[in-house]
């Protein structure tokens, strides 16, 4: 009897987890397992003592991921202990656990990428620092995967410009951002407001002048209805208090479908949120911390929701290719040879 090939999906935030599930739904001929995001060795120790709480590997987001996987009856293999797997599909390469090195690896872009902060510049120059220190700005830079599925030709150019091997990139589109027109079918009760989408910069130990951002939103609104959608990782009580102090008549939502809120808005104001792409795809007036011209160039392709199928086809090609990966022949590419978290390159 021929053994069914095994695929592990490494999830993360709810957005990343939903994308992994969409891809898995197109690969039902293979044996599947899902896991929250994880590291091994010292990275896992850091999680256990709370140093990674602001990341997708922290206890809070891991619990959210577990809740989603369990409530949807998806088979779980936490930390990939039932491997080895023939293929690993992961939402991020800032950490690549040691126990997936022998597998084929497909990396899937989540959405927007953090700007070139001082952390990015520091990690780019000081190879003793792990990539996760600079957040999503290091996406794709491990070079330790076999294929990298990205949102658009614009993002392909962007990642190549950052040093990613273009031969590994496939422009597939990404689930959740490839059919934004569907978000117009919404039961959100408000219309034609100014929507403000905040970011979790402070929770990630980064600078955020929230009062200045709220005042900017008030100027843009110019008396129109303001609605704030908080980032899921934000401290809700603090953010709510700050907004109410300066914009007492604003409506504040800590949960709910943010894409539907974007679809019903007249104007969308973001900081560093992937929701900027939803707003642009739906033709909204947009104010953002991203360079607007660049954001338009990077806009994920709108293919009617077929990105998961395209990514699944990339996965099949990897699964059916009998050639060994470079990691199997040479070991993990030594892109960060001095990292003190070397086991999670």
Image (cartoon, grey):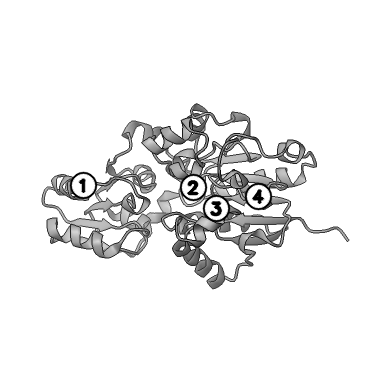
Image marks 3 and 1: residues in contact by CB distance under 8 Å: no
Image marks 4 and 1: residues in contact by CB distance under 8 Å: no
For marks 4 and 2, the one nearer the N-term is 4
Q: Quadrant of the N terminus?
A: bottom right
Q: Quadrant of the C terminus?
A: top right
Image marks 4 and 2: residues in contact by CB distance under 8 Å: no
Image marks 2 and 1: residues in contact by CB distance under 8 Å: no
Q: Nearer the viewer, residue 273 or 40?
A: 40
Label 4 vs label 3: CA separation?
11 Å
Question: SS at mark 1?
Answer: helix
Label 2 vs label 1: CA separation?
25 Å
Q: Nearer the viewer, residue 79 or 22?
A: 79
Residue 192 appearing in the image: yes
Which numbered marker is on residue 110? 2
Above-or-below relation of 78 to 270: below
Label 3 vs label 1: CA separation?
34 Å
Which numbered marker is on residue 43? 3
Image spot of residue 211 (x, y percent):
18, 50
Question: SS at mark 2?
Answer: loop
Tell me: 292 left or right of 312.
Answer: left
Camera-near label (4 vs 2) is 4
Above-or-below relation of 202 to 113: below
Image spot of residue 171 (x, y percent):
56, 37
**Residue drawn 56% across the image and 46% down it:** 341
Residue that label 4 marks: 98
Q: Nearer the viewer, residue 152 or 58?
A: 58
Image spot of residue 316 (x, y percent):
70, 47
Tell me: 270 left or right of 222.
Answer: right
Residue that label 1 marks: 213
């Amino acid at each position: 009897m021929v053994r069914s090939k095994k695929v592990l999906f490494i999830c993360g935030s709810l957005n990343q987890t939903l994308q992994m599930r969409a891809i898995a739904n197109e690969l039902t001929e293979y044996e599947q397992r899902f896991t929250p995001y994880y590291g091994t060795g010292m990275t896992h120790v850091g999680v256990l003592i709370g140093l990674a709480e602001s990341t997708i590997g922290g206890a809070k987001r891991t619990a959210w991921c577990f809740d989603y996987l369990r409530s949807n009856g998806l088979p779980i293999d936490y930390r990939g202990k039932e491997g080895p797997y023939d293929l690993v599909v992961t939402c991020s390469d800032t950490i690549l656990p040691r126990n997936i090195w022998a597998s084929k690896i497909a990396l899937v872009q989540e959405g927007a990428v953090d700007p070139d902060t001082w952390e990015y510049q520091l990690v780019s120059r000081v190879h003793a620092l792990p990539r996760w220190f600079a957040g999503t700005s290091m996406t794709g830079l491990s070079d330790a995967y076999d294929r990298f599925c990205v949102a658009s030709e614009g993002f392909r150019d962007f990642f190549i410009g950052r040093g990613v091997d273009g031969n590994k990139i496939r422009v597939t589109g990404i689930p959740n951002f490839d059919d934004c027109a569907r978000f117009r079918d919404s039961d959100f009760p408000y219309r034609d407001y100014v929507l403000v989408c905040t970011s979790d910069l402070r929770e990630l130990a980064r600078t955020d002048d929230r009062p200045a951002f709220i005042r900017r939103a008030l100027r843009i609104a110019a008396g129109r209805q303001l609605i704030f959608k908080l980032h899921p990782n934000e401290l809700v009580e603090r953010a709510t208090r700050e907004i109410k102090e300066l914009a007492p008549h604003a409506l504040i939502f800590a949960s709910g479908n943010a894409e539907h809120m974007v679809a019903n808005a007249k104007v969308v104001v973001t900081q560093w949120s992937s929701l900027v792409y939803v707003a642009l795809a739906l033709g909204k007036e947009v104010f953002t911390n991203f360079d607007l011209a660049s954001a338009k160039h990077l806009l994920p392709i709108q293919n009617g929701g077929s990105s998961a199928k395209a990514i699944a086809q990339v996965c099949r090609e990897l699964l059916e290719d009998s050639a060994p990966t470079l990691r199997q022949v040479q070991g993990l590419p030594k892109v960060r040879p001095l990292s003190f978290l070397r086991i999670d390159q």
